Image: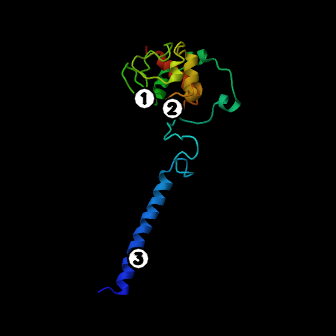
């Protein structure tokens, strides 16, 4: 009934199946591990890594980013800003922000220029933005926030990395100023 060839085939089938499962596990772990495969993303690194990033265009290029802190005349930049170009840049923001006063992931941005911070009714702001409620979203504040939201308001829940180009920031602010 059972000879050595049948037993050998059965053992080889079981070992082959285990090998396929091990290789599949290895491939899936390498493809889907957070942190580039260094620790599996289970918190061993000590810091959470962002699950995704939103591409905002060229990551380099600005003189202020390369040469350190430069004094920027935001009022002049916004005055020279192109609202039509700002509308195109704003398309990166549409997934979380609305311009019609409607609810979304983020607060609506119609009338945001010179509006008090953390003032949209019914939106749950982070503690850091609630602490800034006495201030308003001047073009200068919006410019700094759009450059690096987490640097401007550490602890904000906004996951957007920011707009690296000063021209894009000025254009978006010029566009938002038309949305009153």
Query: Along the line of sight, which residue is nearer the eye, 110 or 16?
Result: 16
- Confirm or deny contact between disc 2 and disc 1 (CB under 8 A): yes
Question: Label 3: how many residues lie within 10 Å, few (<14), some (14-19) or many (20+)?
Answer: few
Give the Cα distance between marks 2 and 1: 10 Å
Give the Cα distance between marks 3 and 2: 52 Å
Give above or below for 1 relative to 169: below
Front tag of 3 and 2: 3
Precedes in sequence: disc 2 or disc 1: 1
Numbered circle sitting on residue 12: 3
Give above or below for 13 relative to 114: below
Residue 115 is left or right of residue 80, and the answer is left
Q: Quadrant of the C terminus?
A: top left
Q: Position of residue 118 (x, y in %)?
A: 48, 18
Q: Secondary structure at mark 3?
A: helix
The residue located at (50%, 16%) in the rendering is 117
Q: Secondary structure at mark 1?
A: loop
Give the Cα distance between marks 3 and 1: 54 Å
The residue located at (46%, 26%) in the rendering is 90
Q: Position of residue 6 (x, y in %)?
A: 34, 83
| Residue where numbered disc 2 is placed | 160
- Furthest residue toward right: 67
Q: Position of residue 134 (x, y in %)?
A: 53, 12
The residue located at (67%, 29%) in the rendering is 63
Res 7 → quadrant: bottom left
Question: Label 1: how many residues lie within 10 Å, few (<14), some (14-19) or many (20+)?
Answer: some
| Residue where numbered disc 1 is placed | 96
Precedes in sequence: disc 3 or disc 2: 3
Give above or below for 130 relative to 45: above
Residue 80 visible from this viewpoint: no
The residue located at (48%, 60%) in the rendering is 26
Query: Along the line of sight, which residue is nearer the eye, 49 or 63?
Result: 49
Q: Position of residue 27 (x, y in %)?
A: 47, 59
């Amino acid at each position: 009934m059972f000879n050595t060839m049948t037993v050998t085939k059965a053992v080889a089938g079981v070992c082959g199946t285990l090998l396929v499962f091990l290789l599949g596990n290895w491939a899936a772990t390498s493809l889907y591990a957070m942190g580039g495969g260094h620790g599996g993303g289970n918190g061993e690194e000590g810091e959470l890594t962002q699950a995704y990033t939103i591409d905002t265009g060229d990551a380099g290029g600005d003189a202020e980013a390369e040469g350190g802190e430069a004094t920027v005349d935001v009022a002049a930049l916004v005055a020279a800003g192109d609202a039509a170009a700002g509308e195109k840049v704003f398309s990166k923001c549409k997934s979380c922000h609305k311009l019609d006063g409607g609810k979304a992931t983020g607060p609506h941005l119609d009338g945001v220029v010179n509006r008090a911070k953390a003032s949209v009714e019914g939106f749950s702001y982070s503690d850091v933005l609630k602490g800034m409620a006495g201030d308003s979203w001047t073009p200068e504040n919006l410019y700094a926030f759009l450059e690096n939201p987490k640097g401007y308001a550490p602890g904000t829940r906004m996951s957007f990395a920011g707009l690296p180009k000063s021209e894009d920031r000025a254009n978006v602010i010029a566009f938002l100023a038309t949305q009153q």
